[in-house]
Image: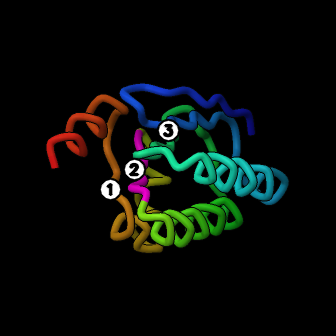
Amino acid sequence: MEYKVRTQNEAKIIELTGALDLHSASDAGALFRETLDANPPLLIIDLSELQYLKSSGYQALVELVKRSEERDIPVAIVGPHEGIRAIMKVFRLDVFFPVYDSVEDALESISSE
């Protein structure tokens, strides 16, 4: 897994590429915690370039949900391919944070709330 963190409209955006699996889940978890510790007004996880998301990766996302709720920081997921999106529905992750097609869609939707 590789990642890039950027800021757009005050939101922190983490772009993940490659695979979020057993080997990279702890790094992703640390990245999520570090980003939340900066108290951004919004955190967007961009999965549009992520090819694989394994069970340990989903666990890192579940932990992100818990930590973001504790800090009252909204989190959005953007761009997961259909396979990842389907499994997110099985794990009901889409109940905890919204899933959007693009960063722009997420920013527009959340800023209008």
Q: Are marks 2 and 1 in contact (CB under 8 Å)?
A: yes
Dot 3: few (<14), some (14–19), or many (≥20) neighbours within 10 Å? many
Above or below, 104 against 16 in this view is: above
Q: Are marks 3 and 1 in contact (CB under 8 Å)?
A: no
Residue under the image location 37 percent in, 32 percent down: 103
Q: Main secondary structure of the magenta part?
A: strand
Question: Where's residue 43, x and y in %?
Answer: 47, 46
Q: Nearer the viewer, residue 51 or 69?
A: 69
Secondary structure under tag 1 reads loop
- In magenta, the rendered stretch is 73-78
How far apart are the two marked residues, 3 and 1, measured between alpha carbons? 12 Å
Q: Amino acid at mark 1?
A: Pro
Secondary structure under tag 3 reads strand
How far apart are the two marked residues, 3 and 2, measured between alpha carbons? 8 Å
Q: Amino acid at mark 3?
A: Asp
Which residue bears the numbered disc 2?
A: 76
Which residue bears the numbered disc 1?
A: 98
Residue under the image location 30 percent in, 40 percent down: 106
Question: Where's residue 71, x and y in %?
Answer: 49, 65
Which residue bears the numbered disc 3?
A: 46
How far apart are the two marked residues, 2 and 1, measured between alpha carbons? 5 Å
Residue under the image location 74 percent in, 39 percent down: 1
Is 4 colored magenta in this rendering? no
Secondary structure under tag 2 reads strand
Please report whichever mark, 2 or 1, sits nearer to the chain's N-terminal start.
2
Residue 45 is marked as none
